[in-house]
Amino acid sequence: MNNISKTNKLLATMIILAITVTACTTFVRTSYQTLSSVATIVDTARNGYNEFYKAGMVKPELAAKVEQAYPIYQQSMGLAVQAVKAYQNLAATGVIVSPDSANLAIQNAQDKTNELLAVFAEAGGPKVEPVTIEKIVVKGK
Amino acid sequence: MDPRAQLILLIVQTLLKYGPEAVTVIVNLLKMKTDPTPEDWDKLLAVVNKPLYNADVKKV
């Protein structure tokens, strides 16, 4: 139990850091860092959920909810990663690209991540504040 | 508070409260001086694509 409480504190700290650390970097890097931080937060929550599950403390109906939400999170995060990567690659060629589709994917990943974190918490995993993933902002836009 | 000072304070607090494991996470974030490489993206995807249940969990 003490470990779980420690995890909660760690998660809270990581969320604050994810926001603070990103203040002075490029926008793609910022998106990467927040996507990466969020993935780490989810991974920590996933491990917490595993501990509860192993201990037989997760009701089958909640386990079913987690099992439904997790692949949706994976898919939306995967899409966001691919979208930011594609934006980075295109921008590197000097092409002026709108970040709108990447930002839509980021918003979707953020929503699905927060839904998953809420289900993890409901199932006895760490309680985490909703996360925010930095979107790409183009200067002058 | 200045963001840098805030960050340093957080690192010290984290080190004291949670030990080196948490600090490693922070340092890895801070170390990033360039835009992400394809390897960085792959590492991120590897975390995202982990299965829900760890290998030691017996699924009921």
Image (spheres, coloured by chain):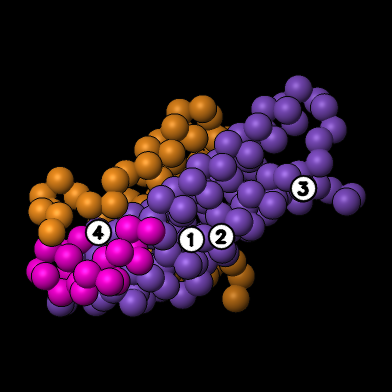
Chain colours: A purple, B orange
Residue A11, numbered label? none
Residue A110, numbered label? 2
Q: In this rendering, does residue B29 appear at all?
A: no
Task: State left or right for residue B45 relative to residue A109.
Answer: left
Asked if the residue under mark 3 is in contact with the one under mark 1, i.e. CB atoms within 8 Å, the reply is: no
Q: Tell me the residue at 89%/50% (across/down).
A: A140
Q: Are the residues under badges 2 and 3 in a single subunit?
A: yes
Label 3 neighbourhood size at 10 Å, few (<14), some (14-19), many (20+)?
Answer: some
In this view, the residue in front, B3 or A116, is A116
Asked if the residue under mark 3 is in contact with the one under mark 2, i.e. CB atoms within 8 Å, the reply is: no
C-alpha distance separating marks 4 and 1:
15 Å
> Split into 4 quadrants, where in the image is the C terminus of chain B?
bottom left
To which residue does mark 3 refer? Answer: A100
Label 4 neighbourhood size at 10 Å, few (<14), some (14-19), many (20+)?
Answer: some
In the image, residue A54 lies in the stretch drawn in magenta: yes
In the image, residue B40 above or below residue B5: above
To which residue does mark 1 refer? Answer: A113
Asked if the residue under mark 1 is in contact with the one under mark 2, i.e. CB atoms within 8 Å, the reply is: yes
Predominant SS of the magenta segment:
helix
To which residue does mark 4 refer? Answer: A47
- The magenta segment is A50-68
Q: In this rendering, does residue A122 appear at all?
A: yes
Image mark 3: chain: A
Image position, residue A2 (x, y; %): 16, 77
C-alpha distance separating marks 2 and 3:
15 Å
Identity, as a three-letter code, of the amino acid under mark 4: Asn
Taking the view exactly as shown, the residue that stands out farthest to the right is A140
